[in-house]
Amino acid sequence: MDLSYSADELAFQSEVRAFLDAELPPEMSAKVRAGTDLTKAQMENWHGILNARGWLAVTWPTEHGGPGWGPVKRHIFEEECCRAFAPRTVPFGLNMLGPVLIAFGTTDQQAEYLPRILDGRDWWCQGYSEPGAGSDLASLKTRAVRDGDHYVINGQKTWTTLGQHANRIFCLVRTKAEGKPQEGISFVLLDLDTPGIEMRPIKLIEGGFEVNEVFFTDVRVPVANLVGTENEGWTIAKFLLSHERTNIAGVGFSMTALSEVKRLAQQVRRSGKPLSENPHFAARMAEIEIDLEAMKITNLRMLAQAEAQGAPGAETSMLKIKGTVIRQALNDLARRALGPAAAPLPSEDLEGNAALVPPDFANGAARYFNNRKLSIFGGSNEIQRNILAKHALGL
């Protein structure tokens, strides 16, 4: 494929930059650059700004409210949003459930849920992982037993990101115990206000509360909330995870992080010289940049393949592995550049003391610790290597 942008794509790039310059609230980009969490209201505001332009659901076809972009335009949009420090859109409804409903949902389900994702009436979260079923998702034990026109659900989900903000959750549940584990799983939609659902926050190592655990006790869900066919949810799960793993690659985020590390290396001095002139640091930075350029090309190839096939293939596991490793390496490089100053410090200790730690990097340690999860969620990198060995290499 031609890796040079066409005249039309360059014009689109300029259009995106002009839009971000005009519409992205400065206080949001400042929080993103500093690694500070946005409030739910701010995230909803950004979603509303993008939806008003028709640029919210970038992977959706035009008939369902998406812009109908090809893979290169989606890549350009992500790259420019990262460059401008725009908030990342919450992916669960837009990039995960939306494509699932478009591919597997009924006409009624599409008409009911897709508009509500776009206009912000519904905030979805994901109910996949369980205490004993994370990367080995087929071993999940949350049960859904048919009772007339309802399923009765009992069990537990964990690591439910931003579930504290959500009003709905899509879940994988076990509807059959016999046979292969993958053959007894179904995909259902739940309202979190349904009696019997309890959500509890989990405190992360950097002190944040972005994930939760969810408990289901005799929760009654209409059978009409089943997506696809009963006991065939594993096919949907694989489809959704392939989209999630492509998004997890985060090429644009890594490109921006690399620019920030380069900027930091110019500010921090060792033995009277900028850290960028340290041969060991410069070599490591160059190594990561080479890996990132290779991943950028691979990402474009995978997006083009997804465009032709209608869904990404097993090769997206490569993006998940390399993308998360590169982002973690960049976080680690920033932490090493800061040295002892990377340790969390009270804000009053940082004021007016750029020599201690540049203000834009005051959350460097928190960002490093938080992103240790990148190589685990969405299916651990060890599992991704197994997927590649089996489905891509035929081993």
Image (cartoon, rainbow, N blue to C red):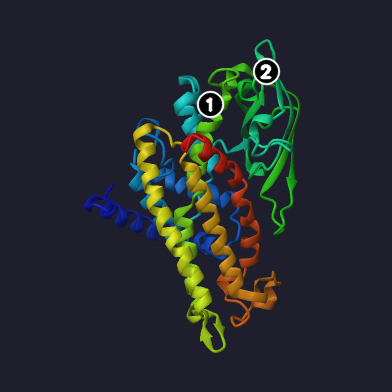
Q: Is residue 293 left or right of residue 390?
A: left
Indicate the amino acid at tag 2.
Lys
Pick whichever, 317 or 256, lies toward us: 317
Q: Residue at x 65, y 24 (%)?
A: 181
Q: What crowding class fits label 2: few (fewer than 14 Cα within 10 Å), some (14-19), or many (20 or more)?
A: some
Task: Give above or below for 350 relative to 36.
Answer: below
Q: Residue at x 52, y 64 (%)?
A: 33
Residue 161 pos. (x, y %): 64, 44
Task: Give above or below for 354 relative to 87.
Answer: below
Tally of numbered tags? 2
**Does any portion of residue 120 appear in the rendered image?**
no
Q: Residue at x 54, y 89 (%)?
A: 272
**Does any portion of residue 171 appear in the rendered image?**
yes
At numbered mark 1, what does the secondary structure look like: helix, strand or loop? helix
Q: Is residue 359 left or right of residue 13?
A: right
Q: Which residue is mark 2?
A: 176
Residue 68 pos. (x, y %): 34, 38
Q: Residue at x 37, y 32 (%)?
A: 309
Indicate the amino acid at tag 1.
Thr
Q: Earlier in the sequence, mark 1 or mark 2?
A: 2
Q: Which residue is mark 1?
A: 235
